[in-house]
Amino acid sequence: MMRRVGRPGLIGMAARTAVVAGTATAVSGSVARHQQNKANEQYEAQAYEAQQQQAAMDAAAAQAVANAQAAAPAAPAAPAAGDDMMAKLQQLASLHTQGILSDEEFAAAKAKLLS
């Protein structure tokens, strides 16, 4: 049997093409997986940071409400209970508009005050 010298035959060319294509597919998949993992890690880090900021804001709002409630008895007595309730409602509204109280906290404090 004679061995052919020179260019590879049709089968050799197809085999070489298959190896190159398979390698490219494997590398492409690996790069895509790496990029996806990196994006997921960044997303989780941002979500954790946002959660920590929200917790800090909630704690600051609770502290502000506690300070406002502690300061209210120290204020001089109002001549009428209706005026005092209006003052407290206005104070709650101002805390809410400043962003110190969330909608839920404002509603709860208002309900407690009106009950």
Image (cartoon, rainbow, N blue to C red):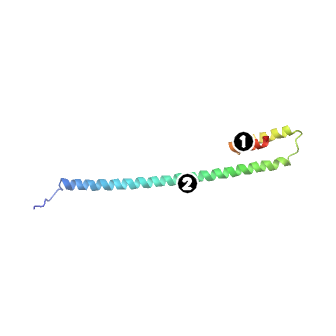
Question: Mark 1 to mark 2: distance in Å?
Answer: 32 Å
Q: Is mark 2 on a helix, strand or loop?
A: helix
Q: Residue furthest front?
A: 115
At label 1, which amino acid type do we have?
A: Ala
Callout 2: few (<14), some (14-19), or many (20+) C-alpha neighbours within 10 Å? few
Residue 97 found in image quarter: top right
Query: On the rendered image, what quadrant is the N terminus found in?
Result: bottom left
Helix, strand or loop under label 1? helix
Residue found at x 48% / y 52%: 39
Q: Of residues 85 and 7, which is closer to you in this image?
A: 85
Please state the horizontal and vertical placement of residue 58, each as a whole percent of the image. Answer: 68, 50
- Note whether residue 67 is visible: yes
Chain-order first, disc 1 or disc 2: 2
At x 35%, y 55%, the residue is: 26
Contact between marks 1 and 2 (CB within 8 A): the answer is: no
Identify the residue under disc 2. Answer: 45
Q: Can residue 102 be seen in this view?
A: no
Q: In which quadrant is the C terminus drawn?
A: top right
Residue found at x 71% / y 49%: 61
Q: Which residue is drawn at 69% across and 43% down?
A: 104
Report x, y in % for residue 74: 85, 49
Residue 85 percent across, percent down from the top left: 82, 40
Check disc 2 and give the amino acid type: Ala
Give the total number of marks visible in the rendering: 2
How crowded pointer 1 is (Cα within 10 Å; few <14, some 14-19, many 20+) is rated as: some
The residue that mark 1 highlights is: 107
- Of circles 1 and 2, which is in front? 1
